[in-house]
């Protein structure tokens, strides 16, 4: 049976060299069109990929079911910091009551996202820079300049040439060992701005099991609920 597809979003890109499709369970389907390609060419490409899109979208639904959840969440679990809350809707204001989060508004996924994502970002900005300094002190990789927490769309983390480490707030949904690894990975980039042998040797010295942790980080959403999105 064909999978119901979301509306395809078109995006013109001066940097794209060819027409391509990008499927993401949280962001939908995007058609990237080079500047010189005509609308007719882009539409013909899209039409020719219809069957592929349907099969790929159905596969995503099986592989990442949490991304397609539409019901309001009943609880919030953040493995990274060993915390869990029951969500109580219809409250007069947003409040953390220890084991409950009081959420204004109706119990819908959209309302949960609107109310909880700013709060999650604040939690991450409180926790992750401190976490980074702790890992840096333990490893001796203290050459970074600053830490920022962002709503990154395609990365769990990054390190700039100037030593700024950027971390995705969604790391809160990963278990602590994975967060430790991701931070260590970015700290190693302060010494080696690539993934070559020297980088891997440094990473292995501090975390011998880094390949398994990297696979856990890369494969799947890390428990990120569908209502959080990407």
Image (cartoon, rainbow, N blue to C red):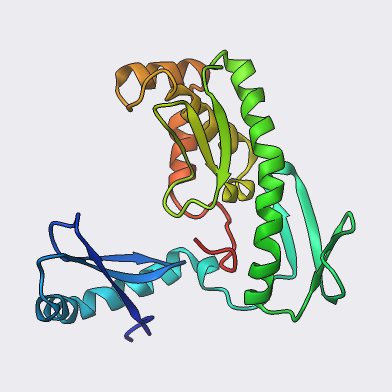
* Rendered position, 108 above or below 116: below
- Residue 23 shown left or right of residue 43 in the figure: right
Task: Give the number of marks.
Answer: 0
* Rendered position, 153 above or below 227: above
- Hey, which quadrant is residue 69 in on the image? bottom right
- Hey, which quadrant is residue 215 in on the image? top left
> Residue 30, percent across and down?
31, 70
The residue closer to the viewer here, 97 or 226, is 97
The residue closer to the viewer here, 72 or 105, is 105
Residue drawn at x 57%, y 16% as measured from the top left: 139
* Rendered position, 84 above or below 179: below
> Residue 217, percent across and down?
48, 44
Q: Which residue reaches farthest right?
A: 97
> Residue 138, percent across and down?
63, 17
Residue drawn at x 66%, y 45% as measured from the top left: 124
- Image quarter of the N terminus: bottom left
> Residue 192, percent across and down?
37, 20
Residue drawn at x 59%, y 20% as measured from the top left: 136
- Residue 178 shown left or right of residue 89 in the figure: left
* Rendered position, 167 above or below 146: below
Residue drawn at x 47%, y 29% as measured from the top left: 185
């Amino acid at each position: 049976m064909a999978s119901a597809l979301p509306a395809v979003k078109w995006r013109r890109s001066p940097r794209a060299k060819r027409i391509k499709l990008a499927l993401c369970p949280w962001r939908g389907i995007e058609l990237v069109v080079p500047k010189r390609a005509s609308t007719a060419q882009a539409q013909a490409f899209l039409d020719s990929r219809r069957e592929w899109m349907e099969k790929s979208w159905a596969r995503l639904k099986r592989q990442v079911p949490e991304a397609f959840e539409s019901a309001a969440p009943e609880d919030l679990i953040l493995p990274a910091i060993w915390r869990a809350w029951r969500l109580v809707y219809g409250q007069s204001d947003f409040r953390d009551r220890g084991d409950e989060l009081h959420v204004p508004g109706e119990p819908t996924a959209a309302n949960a996202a609107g109310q909880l994502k700013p709060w999650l970002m604040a939690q991450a900005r409180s926790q992750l820079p401190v976490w980074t300094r702790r890992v840096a002190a333990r490893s001796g990789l203290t050459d970074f300049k600053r830490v920022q927490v962002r709503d990154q769309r395609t990365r769990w983390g990054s390190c700039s040439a100037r030593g700024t480490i950027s971390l995705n707030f969604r790391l809160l949904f990963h278990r602590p060992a994975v967060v430790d690894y991701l931070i260590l990975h970015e700290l190693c980039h302060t010494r080696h701005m690539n993934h070559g042998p020297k980088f891997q040797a440094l990473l292995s010295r501090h975390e011998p099991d880094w390949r398994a942790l990297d696979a856990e980080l890369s494969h799947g959403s890390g428990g990120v609920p569908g209502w959080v999105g990407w």
